[in-house]
């Protein structure tokens, strides 16, 4: 059986401040509906992401922090996944 990896994409503070209303709130249920009611604030979201980052660091989980251009930074996630797949096959 292949080793499993957990990765997490985390938004950095700058990204959240710039994109919270125009991108994050608008699109956060695109992949999966988590039942968000859009009542949380920018500060709530920053705190949530900081907690997730700490959990990743404490648990040794791989994470990617998106704090600039989403498309460029998410490509790093895809590239990392491609490398992991090549290690398996």
Image: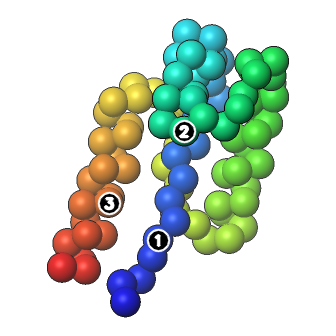
Q: Which mark is residue 53?
A: none
Element under label 3?
helix
Q: Is residue 45 above or below residue 79?
A: above
Of the image marks 3 and 1, the number of the one nearer the N terminus: 1
Residue drawn at x 49%, y 29% as measured from the top left: 30
Quadrant housing residue 72:
top left
Residue drawn at x 52%, y 65% as measured from the top left: 6
Q: Is residue 70 above or below residue 64?
A: above
Q: Is residue 51 above or below residue 39?
A: below
Residue 34 in picture, x, y percent from top left: 66, 37
Element under label 1?
loop
Q: Nearer the viewer, residue 31 or 57?
A: 31
Query: Can residue 14 be seen in the rendering of this structure?
Result: no
Q: Which mark is residue 81?
A: 3
Quadrant housing residue 10:
top right
- Circle 2 Cα neighbour tier, 10 Å, few/some/many (<14 / 14–19 / ≥20): few
Q: Which mark is residue 32?
A: 2
> Separation of disc 3 and disc 1 at Cα?
9 Å
Q: Residue under label 1, please give it.
A: 5
Of the image marks 2 and 1, the number of the one nearer the N terminus: 1
Quadrant housing residue 50:
top right
Residue 52 in picture, x, y percent from top left: 70, 50
**Quarter of the rendering occupied by the C terminus:** bottom left
Of the image marks 3 and 2, the number of the one nearer the N terminus: 2
Residue drawn at x 32%, y 58% as measured from the top left: 80
> Separation of disc 2 and disc 1 at Cα?
20 Å
> Separation of disc 3 and disc 2 at Cα?
20 Å
Element under label 2?
loop
- Is 77 placed left or right of 12 in the picture? left
């Amino acid at each position: 059986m292949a080793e499993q990896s957990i990765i997490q994409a985390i938004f950095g503070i700058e990204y959240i401040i710039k994109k919270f209303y125009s991108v994050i709130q608008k699109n956060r249920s695109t992949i999966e509906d988590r039942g968000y009611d859009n009542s949380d604030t920018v500060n709530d979201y920053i705190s949530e992401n900081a907690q997730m980052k700490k959990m990743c660091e404490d648990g040794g989980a791989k994470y990617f922090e998106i704090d600039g251009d989403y498309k460029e930074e998410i490509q790093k996630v895809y590239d990392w996944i491609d490398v992991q797949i090549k290690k398996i096959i």
